[in-house]
């Protein structure tokens, strides 16, 4: 484990708070206290200059009570076993919350992909599948994209799996290119799902899109599609940031040309990795990334990485509400402070569930061989996200809790039923 603050400990403590209030069997608590399996591998990659580098990689399968593991693969220099474990734990809750027949898993490689050539990146992606081939599978554990991995990377991974098995197995990975069995609507699904949650919340609060200002931290895949769709729905996107900087306007930003500009200046053509920053846009003012988090906006969207808001900066937050598209962007202690200040936090396990929901649709399509058009996928996504969001908001009102506590409660009760169905201590005592 690294020296950084343990993300998994933070997630566990938060879970313990929630378990204390829930009436579920103690077996469930015990089972969810630690991951079922942490697989670690050294992934060798032949570099373009002929040298060999070995990258540490992980696949964590946290719980599979409700079905095969499901979760993305992250390429990032800060990835470690602790982070992947926390992310796999949140996948368990998320899949249960949206009622998908999946458990939770996650993968990661400790690497800075921006320093790799395209060929090196492909070798690493294929190496990841070779390393974890034995523990994944369409009925065991299904990877998907996450930070710094995209549909091109998923294409290499699914191809590597097919090379090993000598079969076409489209349901092994989701988030693939459509030409390889990927689902229509998958790329925008996380952003679309997040907007559906925001709209449901805004309607209940009587907020109109044109009067609602939004700042987005993390102008990547999820953040871009959210910003684009929110802009199209009439919301005012007033600030955007990425890993290099941030821009702000008093009017409204149009995310599409900013995204296009960002992608046109990237180094790896056709890839998501960007060398340029949104700050190169000149028609709007530049601010620091920290200043974006402190803007006086109606909604602050966190779509970058975990721990964006901690005890260090929570006092500076002036937004009316926070929409968590990233996983774990608000620490447990900061969450408590926000709750005391009456700043609503719409939690990650609900807000970003659109991605795994359409991944589930992709898995179903891969297994049946019947493929749906984008309108069908978007409609199916809406019919999952809207009732889930309403259930979380209703439960929070009923129990006088935060929306996160309500979402966790719904998810844990579902997981508990699955665990209990397999036989618990009460069953054996009968
Ligand atoms: P991505 O790599 O495409 O985008 C991440 C963005 O965050 C990049 O633009 C990066 O420059 C920016 N960023 C990094 N550090 C930053 C900082 N300090 N300040 C501002 N911006 C910063 O990744 P993504 O797929 O969009 O995922 C973003 C988050 O959403 C992650 O937490 C991921 O786990 C979560 N998520 C994504 C999906 C999905 O389908 N893409 C699904 C569920 C959850």
Image (cartoon, helix red, strand yellow):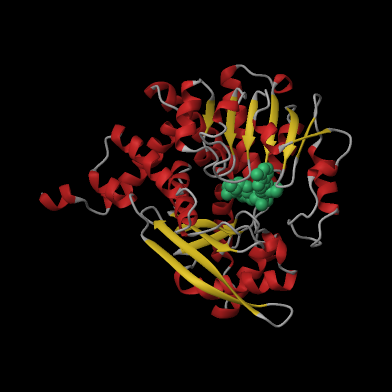
In percent of width and height, residue 133 lies at 50, 73
Q: Quadrant of the N terminus?
A: bottom left
Residue at the spot 63% in from the left edge and 57% down from the top edge: 175
- Locate residue 38 relative to residue 273 in the image: left or right: left
Image label count: 0
- Locate residue 243 relative to residue 98 in the image: left or right: right
- Locate residue 20 relative to residue 255 in the image: left or right: left
The quadrant where residue 400 appears: top left
In percent of width and height, residue 358 lies at 59, 49
Q: Is residue 352 above or below residue 40?
A: above
Taking depth in this image into account, of 424 and 269 the one nearest to the observer is 269
The quadrant where residue 143 appears: bottom right
Taking depth in this image into account, of 2 and 97 the one nearest to the observer is 2
Residue at the spot 44% in from the left edge and 64% down from the top edge: 140
Taking depth in this image into account, of 238 and 378 the one nearest to the observer is 238
Q: Is residue 113 above or below residue 303?
A: below
Q: Is residue 349 above or below residue 147?
A: above
In percent of width and height, residue 145 lies at 61, 57
Of all residues, the one furthest to the right in this rendering is 283
Residue at the spot 79% in from the left edge and 47% down from the top edge: 277
Of all residues, the one furthest to the left in this rendering is 430
Say whether residue 1 is visible. Answer: yes
Residue at the spot 58% in from the left edge and 30% down from the top edge: 322
In percent of width and height, residue 171 lies at 55, 64
């Amino acid at each position: 484990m690294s020296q950084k603050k343990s993300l998994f400990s933070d997630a566990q403590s938060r879970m313990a708070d929630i378990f204390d209030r829930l009436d579920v069997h103690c077996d469930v608590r015990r089972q969810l206290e630690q991951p079922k399996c942490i697989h670690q591998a050294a992934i060798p990659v032949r570099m373009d200059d002929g040298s060999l580098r070995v990258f540490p990689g992980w696949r964590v399968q946290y719980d599979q009570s409700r079905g095969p593991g499901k979760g993305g693969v992250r390429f990032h220099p800060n990835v470690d076993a602790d982070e992947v474990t926390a992310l796999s734990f949140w996948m368990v809750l998320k899949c249960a919350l949206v009622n998908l027949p999946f458990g939770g898993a996650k993968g990661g490689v400790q690497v800075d992909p921006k320093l790799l050539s395209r060929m090196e990146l492909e070798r690493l992606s294929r190496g990841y599948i070779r390393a974890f081939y034995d523990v994944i599978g369409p009925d065991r554990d299904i990877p998907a994209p996450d930070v710094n991995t995209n549909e091109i990377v998923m294409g290499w991974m699914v191809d590597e799996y097919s090379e090993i098995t000598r079969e076409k197995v489209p349901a092994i990975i989701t988030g693939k290119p459509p030409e390889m069995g990927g689902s229509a609507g998958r790329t925008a699904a996380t952003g679309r799902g997040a907007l559906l949650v925001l709209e449901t919340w805004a309607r209940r609060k009587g907020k109109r899109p044109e009067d609602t200002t939004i700042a987005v931290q993390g102008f990547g895949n999820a953040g871009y599609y959210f910003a684009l769709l929110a802009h199209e729905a009439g919301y005012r996107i007033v600030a955007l940031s990425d890993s290099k900087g941030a821009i702000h306007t008093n009017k409204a930003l149009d995310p599409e040309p900013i995204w296009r500009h960002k992608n046109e200046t990237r180094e790896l053509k056709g890839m998501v990795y960007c060398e340029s920053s949104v700050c190169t846009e000149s028609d709007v003012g530049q601010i620091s990334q920290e200043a974006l988090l402190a803007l006086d906006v109606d909604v602050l969207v966190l779509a970058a990485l975990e721990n964006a808001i901690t005890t260090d900066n929570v006092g500076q937050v002036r937004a009316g509400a926070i929409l968590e598209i990233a996983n774990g962007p608000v620490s447990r202690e900061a969450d408590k402070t926000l709750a005391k200040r009456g700043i609503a936090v719409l939690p990650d396990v609900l807000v970003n569930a659109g991605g795994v929901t359409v991944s589930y649709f992709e898995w179903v399509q891969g297994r049946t061989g019947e493929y749906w058009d984008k309108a069908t996928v978007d409609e199916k996504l809406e019919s999952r996200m809207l009732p889930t969001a309403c259930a979380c908001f209703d439960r929070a009102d009923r129990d006088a809790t935060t929306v996160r506590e309500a979402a966790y409660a719904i998810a844990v009760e579902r997981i508990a039923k699955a665990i209990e169905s397999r036989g618990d201590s009460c069953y054996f005592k009968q």
